[in-house]
Image (cartoon, helix red, strand yellow):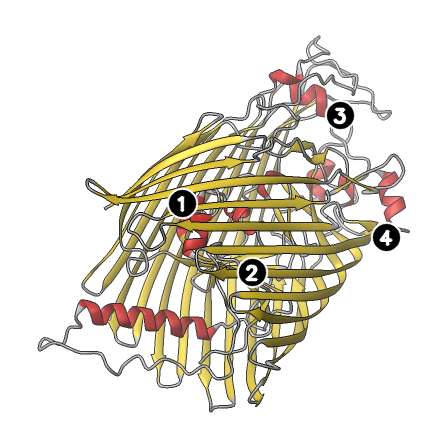
Amino acid sequence: MRHALLLSSAFGIVSATPALTADVVSPPLAPDINLGTNGNMSLPDLDVVAKRLDEARSQIEPNLGATRFDFSRQGIETTPQGDNAPLNQVLLQAPGVAQDSFGQIHVRGDHNEVQYRLDGVQLPEGLSVFGQALETRFAHSISLITGSLPAQYGFLQAGVVDITTKSGTTDPGGEISIYGGMRDLFQPSFSYGGRSGAIDYFITGDFLHTRIGIENPTSSFNAIHDLSNQYHGLLHVSGIVDPTTRISFIAGVSNDVFQIPNNPNQTPTLGLTVNGISDFNSASLTEHQREITDFGILSLQKHIDTVDIQISAFSRYTSLYFTPDPLGDLLYNGISQTAARSVWSTGAQTDASWRVNDSHTVRAGFQGSGERTVAATESQVLLTDDSGAPVSDVPSTVYGSLGKTGGLYGVYVQDEWRVLPRVTLNYGARFDGVDEFTQENQISPRINVVWKATDTTTAHAGYSRYFTPPPFELVSGSTLSLFNNTTAAPATNQNTTVKAERDHYFDAGVTQILLPGLTAGVDAYYKQAKNLIDEGQFGAPIIETAFNYAKGQVWGVEGTTSYDRGPWSLYGNVAFSRAIGRDITSSQFNFTADDLAYISHHYIYLDHDQRWTGSVGAAYTLFKETRSPARLSADLLVGSGLRASTPTVPNGRELPSYYTINLSAVQTLNVGYLHGTQLRLDVINLLDQKYEIRDGTGVGVGAPQFGLRRAILGGIAQRF
C-alpha cells in the first residue's frame, strides 16, 4: 500500500501532496506470467508486464517529500481546448504558476528553471522562445513537482514537469480530429497506438495554422502580422524482451514559423536616416522567426529481484533563425540583424533503486551531456564617430560568429529510510558540475521528512541545496567589440560571464482530507540565492539572454483544495510569492548605466514577480453512466500582475491585476453510426477581458504584450 494522498479529480488537479513511499514494494514482474509452448507471452500477459514495468519505473524516481500536482488523462481532456491546449496553459491551473509572454511560465517566482522529463528522462534545455516543442497531446498524464526536491533532480529545480507519454497500452486505437475557430485557427491532428506481439507503439502529429502565434503588443482584438504555421510529432515505440526487461524509444519533432506582431502608430526615436529615409510605419514591419526542435530518447529498463534500473541515452537539437525588417529595424533599433543559433545536446542518464529491506531503499544515478552551441549574425548598422553621430546614411555590414563546446554532469545517492511506521526520512546528496562558458561544481545535500500523522493528515518539511548552471547560449565580449563606433554600440562592453546559481531551499507543508473526496493543503517555501539567474529579451532578435543578480530571495505560500465525488469535480488554488534580486553581475552590456547603478545598491523585484496567483475550476459530467456522457467545465485564472518600471526604479510597480474565465463542453457520442465521436466547444476569455501581461518596461522586458481576447473554438474527433 502506498501512503500518499493522491486524489485526482476530473481536472486532474491534486492538492499539495507530499509523497510518502516507504512501504512500497517493487512489483513482482516475473511471477504469474504465462508462457506458451513456444516461450512467447500472450497479449494479456504483455499488457500486465507493461503496466508492472511502468509501476517499477515510477519507484526508481519517487517524489519523496516534494509537492506534486497531477493532471490525469481525463483531466487533460476536460480542460478548455483539451489536447489542443498549449502545455503552458495546462500548467497554469497549478498553484504558484504565473503567466508570462511568449508562452513562458514562472514556477514559484523563478524565471525559467523548469525541467521537462519524458518517462523519467530529463530533456536538455533548448532554444525555443515562442514555440513549445512538447505538446499536451503527447501526454497520457502530467505531473508538476515542486518544493524541496530529492537528490535525483538536478540542474533545473524550480519545478519538474514529468510527462508520462502515451503508448499503445495506455492509449490504444486511433483518432483523427479537426479543431479550429476564430483568428483562422485550424489544427488537424491524428494519433494511433497499439501492440503487435511484444512491440508497443504510439504515434501522433498535428499541424497548427493561427493568427495568434505570439501575444498581441496592443489591446486590439486582432494583432497585426501575427501568422504562425507549426508542425509537431511524436513517436513512442517499446519492446518487451522478457518479463523483467523493456527497451523503449521516443522521438519528437517541432518546426514552428512565426511572424513577429507589430505595434502600430510608433515612430523612430533614434533620429537616424538610412539611404535618405528617416521615417517608417511600424505597422509595416516584417520580422519573422523560425524555431526547430528534434529530440530522441533510447531507454533500457530492467528489474532484478529488489533492484530496478533505467539506462537512457538522449539527444536534442534546437535551432532558431530570426530575419529582421531590413529598413525598419535599423531605424527603430540602430541595427538590423539576421541571427541564427543552434544547440545540440547528447548524453546519458542512469537511475537505479535497491530495496535493501523494509526500512531502507537506496537510490543512485548519474547524468552527463555534451553540448555544442553555434551562433552566426549578419548585422546592418550605420557607422558613427566617437560622439555617436552617424558619419553616413549607407548601412555597413558586421558579421559575427561564435562556437563553443561544453558539458554538464551530475551524480547522486540517497536513502529512503522508514524511521517509524508513519515517518519517512529521505536524505542524500548530489555532485554537479558545468564546463561551458563557466567552469564550476558543487556538492548539494538534500533531506526531506514526511510524517503521516493520521490517516487523513500528512505533513512534510525539507531542505535542498541547489546548483543551476546557466543556459548555454551567451554572447561573447569579442562579439560586442565588433559594434564599436556603430549605431549598435552598447553603453558598455562589460560582459562578465554568467555564473551558476547556488541556492538554499526550504519547504514545509501539510495536507488534510477534510471529507470523503475533499482535500486541502498549504505549503510554504523560502529560497536564498547566490548568483540568481534571470533572463531577458533585449531588442531584436527575440532571443532570451541570461544574467546574474549577485543575491536573490524568493519566498511564498500556496493553498490548494480539490473535491471529487460523483459527477462533480472542483479545485481551487491560491499562491502568494515575492522574488527580489540585487546587483547585476553579468551580461552588463544589456543594461543602462542608471539601472546598473541603482540595482547595485538596492534590492528590486524581479520582472517576473507576481504577488498573487489563483486558479479555480469546476466540472460536471452529465449522463455519466451512459455510453454518451457529456462534460461541462469552467475555469478561472487570476493574476495580480507582473512588474514594470517607473522612471526612477527598475521593476518598481505592478501591472494591473486581471482574470479570465474559460468554458468547455465535450459530448461523446456512441449511438448508431456515431461510435467514438467526440464534439468539443471551447470559449477562451469568456468576458473578453483586456489585460496586459507586459507593458514594454522592466528589466529585460523588450516589448508590450496583451493576453488573448475572446476566442470561440470547436472541434470534432473520431476514434477508431
Q: Is residue 248 left or right of residue 566?
A: left
Assess whether mark 1 and mark 3 are in contact (beta carbons under 8 angstroms): no
**Quick one: SS at disc 3?**
loop
Q: CA distance from mark 1 to mark 2?
A: 36 Å
Residue matched to label 2: 562
Residue matched to label 1: 253
In this rendering, the answer to whether 683 lies above or below 601 is above
Does label 1 or label 2 sit earlier along the sequence? Answer: 1
Residue matched to label 3: 487
Does label 4 or label 3 sit earlier along the sequence? Answer: 3
Q: CA distance from mark 4 to mark 1?
A: 42 Å
Q: CA distance from mark 4 to mark 3?
A: 32 Å
The residue located at (41%, 66%) in the rendering is: 312
The residue located at (28%, 72%) in the rendering is: 49
Assess whether mark 4 and mark 2 are in contact (beta carbons under 8 angstroms): no
Give 565 or 120, whichever is nearer the viewer. Answer: 565
Decide: few, some or many residues near mark 2? Use Cα within 10 Å; few <14, some 14-19, many ≥20.
many
Residue matched to label 4: 603
